């Protein structure tokens, strides 16, 4: 998820730079694959973020179930006094 967020931030910065300062962008950035296919990379990043946010709660529940099986039937809480 962090990688998708990073790619989205890079794409947003490149998109804003293309719209606001098109004359000041160096040639090596214009020839970069991120810059040439900026909308595709942005869509892939958003899709990755959505996919991770959909699957993350299910994975956390499964990990809690496995943890309860390993530790017995008592529930484990991080900040519990018991």
Image: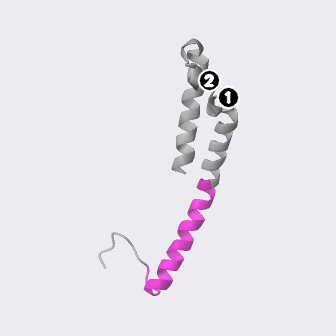
Image quadrant assignment for residue 42: top right
**Tags 2 and 1 in contact by the CB under 8 Å rule?**
yes
Q: Is residue 2 magenta?
A: no
Q: Label 2 to label 1, Cα distance in Å?
A: 7 Å
Q: Residue at x 50, y 84 (%)?
A: 69
Who is closer to the viewer here, 7 or 57? 7
Q: Magenta stretch mostly in which secondary structure? A: helix
Q: Which mark is residue 36?
A: 1
Who is closer to the viewer here, 66 or 75? 66
Q: Is residue 51 left or right of residue 13?
A: right
Q: Is residue 75 above or below residue 79?
A: below
Q: Residue at x 57, y 27 (%)?
A: 14
Q: Earlier in the sequence, mark 2 or mark 1?
A: 2
> Percent from the top left, x then y, of residue 56?
57, 60
Image quadrant assignment for residue 19: top right
Q: Is residue 20 above or below residue 1?
A: above
Label 1 CA crowd tier, 10 Å (few <14, some 14–19, many 20+): few
Q: Which mark is residue 45?
A: none
Q: Is residue 51 above or below residue 82?
A: above
Label 2 CA crowd tier, 10 Å (few <14, some 14–19, many 20+): some
Q: Which residue is mark 2?
A: 30
Q: Secondary structure at mark 1?
A: helix
Q: Secondary structure at mark 2?
A: helix
């Amino acid at each position: 998820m962090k990688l998708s967020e990073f790619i989205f931030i890079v794409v947003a910065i490149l998109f804003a730079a293309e719209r606001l300062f098109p004359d000041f962008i160096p040639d090596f950035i214009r020839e970069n694959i991120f810059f040439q296919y900026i909308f595709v990379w942005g869509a892939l990043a958003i899709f990755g973020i959505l996919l991770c946010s959909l699957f993350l709660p299910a994975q956390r529940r499964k990990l809690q179930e496995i943890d309860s099986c390993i530790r017995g039937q008592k529930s484990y809480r991080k900040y519990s006094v018991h």
